[in-house]
Amino acid sequence: MRVALFAPCFVDHLVPSAAIAALRVLERLGIVVDVPDGAACCGQPVANAGFASAGAAALERFADTFASYDHVVVLSGSCAVHVRGHATGIGDAGIRVAQRTTEFCAFLHDVVGVERVRMLGATLRARVALHIGCHALRGLDLARPSELQLRPSNKVRAVLATVEGLSFAALARPDECCGFGGSFSIGEGAVSARMGRDRLADVQAGGATALVTTDLSCAIHLRGVDRAAGGALPMWHVAEVLAGMAACDALDASGGER
Amino acid sequence: MRDRGEPRPLPVLDATGAVDHAAGAERFVANEARTTWHDASLWFVREKRDRAASTVEDWEALRDAASAIKTHTLSRLDEYLAQFEQRATARGITVHWARDAAEHNEIVLGILSARGARRLVKSKSMLTEECGLNDYLIGRGIDVVDTDLGERIVQLRNEPPSHIVMPAIHLKKEEIGETFHEHLGTPAGDDDPDALTAAARVHLRARFLAADAALTGVNFAIAETGGIVVCTNEGNADLGTALAPVHIASMGIEKLVPRAADLGVFLRLLARSATGQASTVYASHMHAARPGQALHVVLVDNGRSAQLGRADFWGSLKCIRCAACINTCPVYRRSGGYSYGSTVPGPIGSVLTPGFDLQKYASLPFASTLCGSCAAVCPVRVDLDVQLYKWRQLAVDAGYVSPVKGWLMRRLGAVLADPALLQLTVGIAGAILRVVPRPLARRLAGAWGRWRELPEMPAQSFRAWYRANRRGPD
């Protein structure tokens, strides 16, 4: 089984700690992981803004880079959705890569299995608000969206439930969009920021001590909104929780007291 | 308080006359308390919809069935329209065909003029809003009274509806109290919903009794029987059509279903999706004129054939106008109906309206995070988020985004395809951020920094770390 880890452009440069965490988690699970040179981005940021043609080169490079892997584990739900939905338009290699591209939590849940994840023995004393990116939620079936009248399921929650000491804050609107939306965050900045504030207010009302997410693009936006209002809510990727790095951060923040 | 003739609450337009959704939305959210209230009002309806849907076993299968029936109908729309005309005509219904809004309005005026009708009562019809019928008729001496309570409220205020199911959802009861005080003579300061509704009832009853003609919309037209179904909660369509000697029913050509049995699917979905009710209070099946009454059905195209011919967007014609996508849309809830500048706002409006005039409505497909909640609530499974994405591509291809944005996005596309160039760009940005004071940096970051703090720039990227720690020195 050849497994590649893809840290999307913004994760690579803005949240490298999460990618390091993901790599460590996969390695500890005994998976041989490759981080090939080549693609830096899947092209989603420009494609969703209406410039799919301008993003085509990035997507083609992605397909080339990951053509030979059995699993391409992407550290972003929305990028995985973009590749799965759009790489199919660039020939056989694209179709193959689209089928083999998955998101980090989906890979852990579907391929690795929750019982193996439990053996990581991760610990985090926190009451977390779970934020699954909208694309990951509705485009990858990571969890049952609140609109659908189907049996409840939540792969991310199942993965995080293996973490000792971690509990989940109940949100009034469990899967309300945070307002990031790529270029929407710029073009519709006022509404985007308002959505972010509303999401954070729900997180706070739920008594969460931290936010854990599948999508760091959401978290970068939410952190920006939170910090602009003087907040300090910790926000982590699921991988950082599983790798124990979130626990270290929490320990640092509390001055070493637990 | 606005008087008649004063400007309506128009959307914000840019220099070219195109709707600037972002500007209208920014104006809306500037009132934080009102935005909170508006968002909560619509979220209440969304939650009510969830509870209603949860009571139906196999809700998702019902959505599949509805989508399949509509898809089939649209694939043979010409045949079903001809069948409907034939069956309706056989029942004594007069069927008219309108190519566009102007033809529709002329046909309605022609029916009224032939009868010497001067007083028209209307039940809710977004199609007549789309056609600008009220202004057209009022300008030609017809007294037009909207009889749906919400529609009457916005009509008295000389405003368009801000929502297709709840036309006055943008108004608070205090504001409605003021409007009624001014126009209906209710006591100043009276904002009790029951009292205001009672006042509207008395006011409208006189109009119903005096009407020469009644116009209704159509929720479903049945090809097999030649009949129509009109759904309301207030009974106003029934009262209007039961009293007036002429009934005009205006419908978009996409409102057809093949068989009466299909209504069993759609009527179960419609009210639950729209307002969380198990059923609308009235679902009136009209299959012939009353004795002594004339019944006219106006079939309106107005761009629908063109939309049907668009491979990526024909699915939007499956829409049954329940507004579930509007209620769930996190952007609509926080930007209000008027920011869209179109008769149908929200996600469905943003895929329908660009078909009329892409240049004018190019900003609407961008008024979304593509979160997909709209498609997930849609009772007929319109793939709204996919269609929004596709309209964005067409808007860009047609050159309807700013040249600056176009240049930036194409440059960004090139940078993202080239890891070395991306590393260089990020390196430069990081170097600038490290020397520039934060407040200035936020200003330099434009729209991002206006609303948010900037992210920290780590000293080392993941790839650089990986090279150093997993592969050893190059």
Image: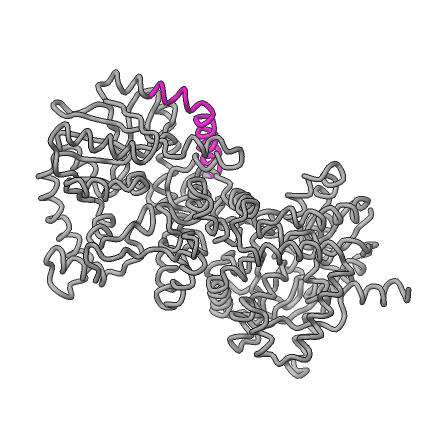
Residue A30 is covered by the magenta coloring? no
Q: Which of B35 and B378 is in front in this view?
A: B35
Q: Give the range drawn in magenta.
A: B60-84
- Coloration mode: one colour
Who is closer to the viewer here, B41 or B390? B390
In the rendered picture of this protein, how many numbered marks are placed on residues?
0
**B79 is within the stretch colored magenta:** yes
Image vertical order of residue B165 relative to residue B288, above or below: below
Characterize the magenta stretch by its predominant secondary structure. helix
> Residue B210, located in which quarter of the rendered image?
top left
Q: Which residue is at 74% across, 56% downward?
A: A40
Residue drawn at point x = 57 percent, y = 76 percent: A232
Could one spot residue B58 in this view of the protein? no
Residue B11 visible in the snapshot: yes
- Give left or right: position of B291 versus A75: left
Q: In which quarter of the image is residue B278?
A: top left
User: Relative to B165, does residue B294 appear above or below in the rendering?
Assistant: above
- Give the camera-side residue of A49 and B29: A49
Residue A170, position as x, y percentages in the image: 50, 62
The answer to whether B439 appears left or right of B63 in the picture is right
Q: Where is residue B61 in the image (x, y as percent from the top left)?
A: 48, 35
The quarter of the picture where the C terminus of chain B appears is: bottom right
Most extreme residue toward the front is B16
The residue at 10%/48% (across/down) is: B202
Question: What residue is drawn where x is 68% and y is 66%?
Answer: A241
Residue B233 screen position, x and y as percent: 25, 43
Tell me where residue B253 appears, x and y as whole percent: 36, 30
User: Which quadrant holds the N terminus of chain B?
Assistant: bottom left
Q: Decide if residue A70 is on the left or right side of residue B8.
A: right
